[in-house]
Amino acid sequence: MLLVGIDGGGSGVRALALDLEQGTLSSCDYDSPADFSSIPSAAVLDALQRAGHGALVRQSRVADVAFAGVAGCVSEEQRASVEERLISAGVARSVAVHHDAYTAWFGATLGRAGVVVMAGTGSSVFMVDRMGAELLIGGYGALFGDEGSGSDLGREFLRAAVAAEDGYGQATRIRTAALAALGVSSMRAAMGDKESSEASWLASLVPPFLELVGEGDSSAVAILRARLACLADQIVVAVNACDASGAPLLFGAGSLFGNASYLDELRSAVRERRRDVTLQPSPCNSVQGALLAAVARGEGSSRSDLSRALELLRAP
């Protein structure tokens, strides 16, 4: 059985193909955003198709099953458009589609009740309870929300730099770091200097901001804590709604969880609200979650197929 998992997000698309019988994996990273909340639908579909085909080049055949998790994909119309494109383009014979928080949740829990927090270019919180009921919180895109995400922190980074430049803010180290990251001599000179996707451009500015956090800069730490307080509030709503026995499983997925300062601050914010819940990094990334979800959807698939796929993903 040949399976494909596709993860579409605000910074690009990743795809993984697995031949379950042969035990071979191939991948493709396509550097084009695929987020229905901020990118035209036609561009999203093109990016998903290209990544899917890219992962299948070594296989030289159509996949049996594909599962696509796509940022901002929350309507039946959007899901139908992805399914139709991937089938008609010859990526897979059978396609299932959900938003990217679902595939992150599946990769973290392998289908068990629990909560996953997505924090990369955007952010969202997703819960599935023991009865299979789903709850999505956040995920509204850079304009309406995405609290604690890369785009959110990048925007606050720039705002603090502007405030320092114009004299009504004290974050002088933030201003210096922002100017260096942007390659300009003043914040005003940076106006209009952004790429086609505002969300991904803002998120690209987060590394120097988090570096300041790690160094203990008080202004940067205060910004991070304020934004993560909003995200922690969303997490607690999902945790309270999850009826798993005992404290629900809570996982963090997305690029920001690779930063120790980010993870520690969000853990602290969650503990302040629910002391019985521990946030832990997901054992799988989102594209691995998409692939595992495809395995689970395969005709005649079993728990042993899921276990074998997981072993192959974890192999060196």
Image (spheres, rainbow, N blue to C red):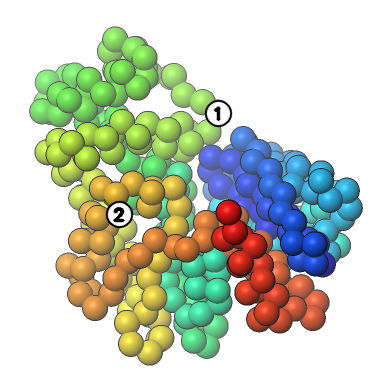
The answer to which of 192 and 210 lies nearer the viewer is 210
Q: Residue at x 35, y 34 (%)?
A: 207
The answer to which of 95 and 285 lies nearer the viewer is 285
Q: Is residue 237 above or below residue 78?
A: below
SS under mark 1:
loop
Residue at image mark 1: 196
Please identify the quadrant where the C terminus is shown. bottom right
Q: Residue at x 42, y 37 (%)?
A: 203
Depth check, mark 2 against mark 1: the one in front is 2
Q: Residue at x 17, y 25 (%)?
A: 173
* Residue 315 in picture, x, y percent from top left: 59, 59
* Residue 17 in picture, x, y percent from top left: 73, 55
Q: Quadrant of residue 217?
A: top left
Q: Is residue 230 above or below residue 102?
A: above
SS under mark 2:
helix
Residue at image mark 2: 263
Mark 2 or mark 1, earlier in chain: 1
Tell which residue pokes out farthest to the front in this image.
316
Mark 2 to mark 1 CA distance (whole Å)? 29 Å
Q: Quadrant of residue 310?
A: bottom right
Callout 2 touching callout 1 (CB < 8 Å): no
Q: Is residue 287 above or below residue 103?
A: above
Q: Quadrant of residue 99?
A: bottom right
Can residue 183 be seen from the camera position used here?
Answer: yes
Numbered tag placed on residue 245 in the rendering: none
